[in-house]
Amino acid sequence: MVWRNVGDLILSKKQRGRGLKYTDEFKQKLVAESLADGMTVPMVANKHGVPTSRIYSWRGDPRFQGPETVMPEFTPVELTAADDQPEVVEPARSEPRIEITLENGRKLSISDCVDAGFVLELARGLAA
């Protein structure tokens, strides 16, 4: 059983039976703990007896983000002009090994690197 510090809870007659209301300090503490290296939300939730969904919602709320919380950022990318791009060299293509003419007149050219099962399915599809 997980015991909670009563100082972390705010209870009133209206709130009894509808769940618990936690102090903002407690929420900030759990958010910071869940963002620490090596910790996960389920680990923090089990430790403090709080549903994981609540911690995830608190993590998305800016009120509970501490000043030291580092949010992930995008990595800056520098684009260069097309003239500065290295030339792309395409692999040498081998000549088609087999050319198949289907009943409907469509032609299928196959090189040596194509899977035979794929060719068979493609030919069936084109012939339909």
Image (spheres, rainbow, N blue to C red):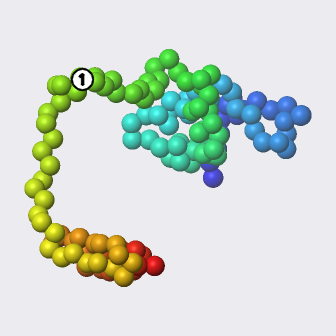
Residue 95 vs 115, above or below: the answer is above
In the displayed structure image, the side of residue 18 where residue 81 appears, left or right:
left
Q: Position of residue 50 (x, y in %)?
A: 64, 43
> Is residue 16 among what the camera can see?
yes
Q: Which residue is drawn at 76% across and 30% down?
A: 10
What is the crowding at mark 1: few (fewer than 14 residues within 10 Å), some, or many (at least 20)?
few
Amino acid type for the residue under numbered disc 1:
Thr
In the displayed structure image, the side of residue 103 where residue 82 appears, left or right:
left
Q: Residue at x 36, y 82 (%)?
A: 103
Q: Where is residue 48 in the image (x, y as percent from the top left)?
A: 59, 42
**Which quadrant of the view contains residue 18?**
top right
**Circle 1 SS class:** loop
Out of 36 and 12, give the one closest to the viewer.
Answer: 36
**Which quadrant of the view contains residue 63?**
top right
Out of 63 and 47, give the one closest to the viewer.
Answer: 63
Which residue lies under the disc numbered 1?
80
Q: Which residue is drawn at 12% across and 53% down?
A: 91
**Which quadrant of the view contains residue 6?**
top right
Please identify the residue farthest to the front as the structure is shown.
Answer: 105
Out of 3 and 116, give the one closest to the viewer.
Answer: 116
In the displayed structure image, the side of residue 51 where residue 43 appears, left or right:
left
Out of 109 and 39, give the one closest to the viewer.
Answer: 109
Residue 95 vs 73, above or below: the answer is below
